[in-house]
Image (tube, rainbow, N blue to C red):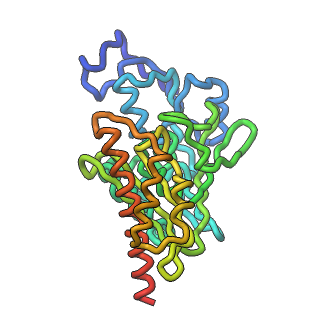
Amino acid sequence: MVTNKVLNPVNINERNSRIIPFEFEYYEPRTLEEAVDILHELGDEAKVIAGGTDLLVKMKTGQVHPRVVVNIKKIPGLRYIREEGDYIRIGALTTLRDLEKHEVVMRHLPALYDAVKKMASIQVRTVATLAGNLCNASPAADTAPPLLVYDPVIVAVGPSGERQIPLREFFLGPGKTVLKPWEIVKEVVIPKAKSGYSAFVKISRTSVDIAIASSAVYLDVKEDVISEARIAVGSVAPVPLRAVKTETRLRGLRMGSTEVMIALQGLDEEISPITDVRATAEYRRHVAKVLVWDALHLAYSRYRERVINQ
């Protein structure tokens, strides 16, 4: 155990932002069981850290003040991407850079690949983890919409063992998930798509900034008619979400038809964007529909390319 002490905490705006202006205890467990035991004992007083690209920023700017930080980075066996039958399993310590470089992600999860290769800088992607991005529960989390269209489950570990949480039920609000204070994400399990094509697009102020709005799509077509559509959006509601009503409206429509754009107007019923420093609610409401349209056509272009090359 290491204790980090800073005497006489002051306003963060008066200090270098590299300094954490409060005292906390630091643990480095070597097993999941040990980490769970620590969290079970301390509850809300503890925070889990993996890559630290979200938590450390919040600690430095005074947004959170954990009494204890539990670093799970030294726990072996949590950094992997592997195929097991009809599933792809991604360990909790797998970084965004791991995902960006992995052939399985490129081949089976193109929407997730689209997202991670555009996230932040390469320095951030090298340390930031997929599980951390999800557990931070930002409405703008870039990995959430592409994962939502694949219908994965989060495997969490607690004192009573493992439990599986569908990602669609994982987010409760900004910064809030269904995880108990003593639970740790072990892995993300994603079913392989039998057919269909996926894509992710976003708009942001700069290429490395978080999304003003984003959309992911999973699309299956039969003779250019949509047989299945899954749509997820980010930064336009308190949580990343599946637009289930819009999905239903799209089924049976021909790609590229005016009926598709008309169906997308119903997205307004499912989102609740806000105005903030990045964009107005009105702009987000408009651009969300455009991004879904763009993601649909990117996924469709991948289908057409496959047909042409067969």
Identify the residue at the far bottom of this view: 310
Q: Is residue 73 positioned above or below 116 on the image?
A: above
Question: Where is residue 72 drawn, in percent x and y?
Answer: 53, 40
Question: Where is residue 56 drawn, in percent x and y?
Answer: 39, 32
Which residue lies at the image location 37% right of the left edge and 46% below the top edge? 285
Identify the residue at the far right of this view: 160
Question: Where is residue 106 drawn, in percent x and y?
Answer: 44, 69
Q: Is residue 281 positioned above or below 299 on the image?
A: above
Q: Is residue 159 positioned above or below 97 on the image?
A: above
Question: Where is residue 207 drawn, in percent x and y?
Answer: 26, 52
Inspect this view and state whether residue 28 appears.
Answer: no
Which residue lies at the image location 60% right of the left edge and 40% below the top edge? 184
Q: Quadrant of residue 160?
A: top right
Inspect this view and state whether residue 122 appears.
Answer: yes
Q: Quadrant of residue 159?
A: top right
Name the one closer to the observer, 116 or 14: 116
Which residue lies at the image location 46% right of the left edge and 60% below the top edge? 263
Identify the residue at the far top of this view: 8
Q: Quadrant of residue 195?
A: bottom right
Q: Is residue 117 positioned above or below 71 on the image?
A: below
Name the one closer to the observer, 115 or 59: 115
Name the one closer to the observer, 296 or 61: 296
